[in-house]
Image (spheres, rainbow, N blue to C red):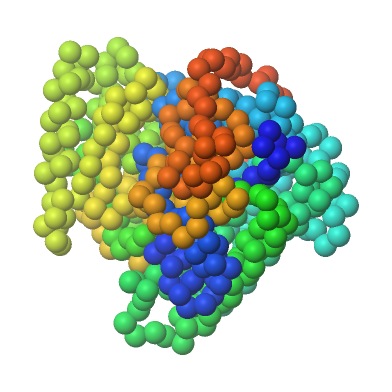
Amino acid sequence: MTKNGQTTLMIGLDGATFSILDPLMDAGHMPFLRQFVAQGVRAEMQSTIPPITPPAWTTIMTGRSPAQHGILDFFRPESPGSRFLRFVSTKQLKCESIWTHLMHQGLSAINLNFPVMAPPLPIKGYSIPGFVTWRHLRHSCSPADLMDTLKTIPGFDLKIIAHDFGLEEKVVQGCSFAESEGWIKYHTYKDEQWLLVLGHLTRTDPCDLSALVLDSPDRLQHVYYRLLDPQCFPVDWSEQDRQIRSVLEGHYRALDDMIARMAAGAGPEANIFIVSDHGFGPSQECFYLNTFLEQLGHLKWSERAVSDQDGAGDVSMEAVRNHGNILDWEQTLAYVNTPSSNGITINVAGKNSRTGIAPEDYDTFVNTLREQLLNLRHPRTGQPVVTRIWTREEAFDGCELAPDLTVRLWDNGLVSTVKSDRIVKPRRECIGVHYPMGVFMAKGPDIQPGLQLEPLNILDVAPAMLHSLGLAIPAAYEGRVPVEMLRKECLAARPVVIDDAAPSFEQQAAASLEMDAEDMDLIVKRLKGLGYLA
């Protein structure tokens, strides 16, 4: 039992945004969530730079920014400036997770479906990571025999919690009308399976903190955003669009019921937090940043360059892992490693490249490139294509693996790395992309009712949960406890305490779970299907 006799539940809704949730609540599709907000607090929440899944959820589970926890993207360079990429894992974590911190405080935790949680971290409780192939799942869970326990749950489909890459690949090819209903209902079923796991664990061995990420909002919004946000609805609805919209409404009604059941299972004495890793919004065009760098004379394609005309920008695993396949490195000064990073790496001679700009010319080159990017105008609207640029020092101070420059686009979309005949092209249809502002909602004995808070930061989630559990906040945490959401009597009885003792962090020597080429290729296909690779 926690130090204040309460438990805490965190429900993660990957990619949730009030742009979609509010209309669904107003239309009666999410009655429990509407009541939850009315009886608790709500706020928009600023995500990480860039607002993508691995760094954002890792920030939530560490209380640190990407520069401090070390997870910047789905992939990481093997070394600063390296053209060779590897998929990220807990081996790259540079600080303690909240799960391990609770263990050191004598408290237990359940974390389910969080990315970047394999190999497993030390934990008192239970851990099942997200984004892990089926054959690696058993060895990625904690405790080691957890999979055997799950097999005893009545009605549980064990294999569903690992990703069905064949099914997800439909998004790569485009989800036809005939496939849409099954694809949407697959995600409803998958969420239900995760809920079965959470319910079983909390009944048989209740923990102080229980946390589950439901990723269906992100998956569905990427594909069907135009049918979810009223601001993007078609002018003339086709019968097929109406049918898909109806199935989507059914999913969100089911999601609302799942949230209600999780809250009921936590009990009236639990503080409940509902958060997203980032928000969502529409994107109708794609910006080919490597092509723009080529036009500036900063990049040279190789003879094996991949064109968007070769299949909507398909990128092979080898091209992702080794840009030597698509770029002429002897004549490339600046390039984008991965679209999900929205980041530009600069080749510096003698540092990360045999050729490149001279170290003494680095600052001048960066300033010139910033100006070139900020002066770029959209060919159709005349508005800036790049609306914000961060240097490595501004966004990822002290992190050598970070891009030299990170950009934000006019529509918050991800850039494309492939060769194109134009720098901006229309997409086949409006899709959903990650926006910086996610959601924060909370309700419970400590929480004031009916408050709309000023925007919070994603760094505030971990401190809020630790305070809910009656714990001091490590001084190394970069966020704060949003005290404005707390009842005055609760805050007076349990004021925020900062622990100035610097906790030591030793990376756990976990068993190697390196992925082979087949695993990596499946993951790349899935990331491309969701718009992270193009």
Give the percent coordinates (x, y) of residue 433. Answer: 39, 56
Location of residue 106 with respect to 208 vertically, above or below: above
Left/right of residue 406 with respect to residue 214 in the rendered view: left
Q: Nearer the viewer, residue 472 or 16?
A: 472
Q: In the rendered image, is residue 160 in sight? A: no
Instruction: Say which residue appears at 44% left-offset and 21% top-offset.
Output: 79
Quadrant in the picture for residue 260: bottom right
Give the percent coordinates (x, y) of residue 189. Answer: 68, 65
Give the percent coordinates (x, y) of residue 167. Answer: 62, 61
Location of residue 321 with respect to 453 vertically, above or below: above
Q: Tell me the quarter of the image containing the N terminus.
A: top right
Location of residue 349 with respect to 39 vertically, above or below: above
For the image, the number of numbered tags is 0
Left/right of residue 57 with respect to residue 423 in the rendered view: right
Instruction: Say which residue appears at 60% left-offset and 65% top-offset.
Output: 255
Left/right of residue 439 with respect to residue 470 in the rendered view: left
Location of residue 89 with respect to 457 vertically, above or below: above
Instruction: Say which residue appears at 59% left-offset and 72% top-offset.
Output: 253
Quadrant in the picture for residue 310: bottom left
Give the percent coordinates (x, y) of residue 454. Answer: 35, 50
Q: In the rendered image, is residue 196 in sight? A: yes
Q: Nearer the viewer, residue 86 or 303?
A: 86
Q: Nearer the viewer, residue 502 or 220?
A: 502
Instruction: Say which residue appears at 45% left-offset and 41% top-offset.
Output: 483
Q: Nearer the viewer, residue 176 or 144?
A: 144
